[in-house]
Image: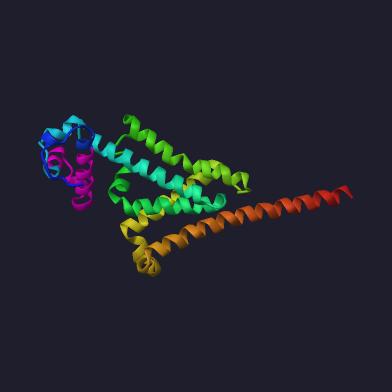
Amino acid sequence: MSLKGSSATVRGHALRERILEASIAMIETDGLEALSLREVARRAGVSHQAPYRHFADREAILAAICEQGFTILGEKVAKAREAGANPTDSIELATRAYIDFAVEHRAHFRIMFRPELVHLDQHEQAMRAANLAFGHVPAMVAVAMRGGLLVEPSAEAMTATIWSFAHGYACLLLDGPLTMMMPGAAANPKKATRDATKALRCMLDATIKHGEGQAATESTRRRRSVR
């Protein structure tokens, strides 16, 4: 979308989206510290008062970016889940979608999980979008559990493990240590991401096979004890 034109010709939703677009572009090119309502207005080509029609302050803009980011993330993860052939396949694809989102929407990702920048509990719509996006993780764990996934010591711990994997991998990839320490990731980041999420899935599948083996062993023991 072009940022040309004055605030007199930009109204309502269009003005809000224009300001958000300018804010995201500014963060991507100049860093978060450059963001201010006055500078956003200048880059968006509107009056310096125009941003205040939709955003009370800098945090309100960041909260809107968070809301937008969590909405996009939730949609990507939901689509990935649906594409999975089975529960662990869904987890693999959803984890990859999470990492791909971080790479494709870096400005959003660097703000969404920063409580010192945005108090999500003070921004209802952003909080709702965050909860909807996160809700996919425990939901996937629950489905996988019904398929035989072992969750020791708890489903909550497994949820935290999967989320930590996706988020930690994304941070290492964006911030550089992953490609610096691993030549394969540096040469082909997309393939490295595919391989890493496949490794996660293999570990989850292994717990299912282990559980099936334990169940078979226990069944054999019961039959022998009856004889």
Kindly give the residue lying farthest to the front in the view shown: 9
Kindly give the residue lying farthest to the right in the view shown: 227
Residue 178: x %, y % from top left: 37, 61
**Is residue 4 shown left or right of residue 217?**
left
Who is closer to the viewer here, 169 or 181? 169
Count of marks overlaid on the render? 0
* In the image, residue 29 lies in the stretch drawn in magenta: yes
Q: Is residue 53 above or below residue 175?
A: above
Residue 120: x %, y % from top left: 33, 34
Image color mode: rainbow
What residue sits 56% from the left and 49% below the top?
A: 87
**Is residue 83 shown left or right of residue 172?**
right
Q: Is residue 224 above or below residue 116?
A: below
What residue sits 44% from the left and 47% below the top?
A: 77
Residue 147: x %, y % from top left: 62, 47
Q: Is residue 97 visible?
A: yes
Q: Is residue 7 above or below residue 218?
A: above
Who is closer to the viewer here, 208 or 78? 78
What residue sits 41% from the left and 43% below the top?
A: 74
* In the image, residue 188 lies in the stretch drawn in magenta: no
Q: Is residue 113 visible?
A: no
**Is residue 172 shown left or right of residue 210?**
left
Tell me which secondary structure the magenta stretch mostly adopts: helix
Q: Quadrant of residue 193?
A: bottom left
Q: Is residue 59 above or below residue 226?
A: above
Residue 181: x %, y % from top left: 37, 66
Q: Which residues are magenta?
A: 17-41
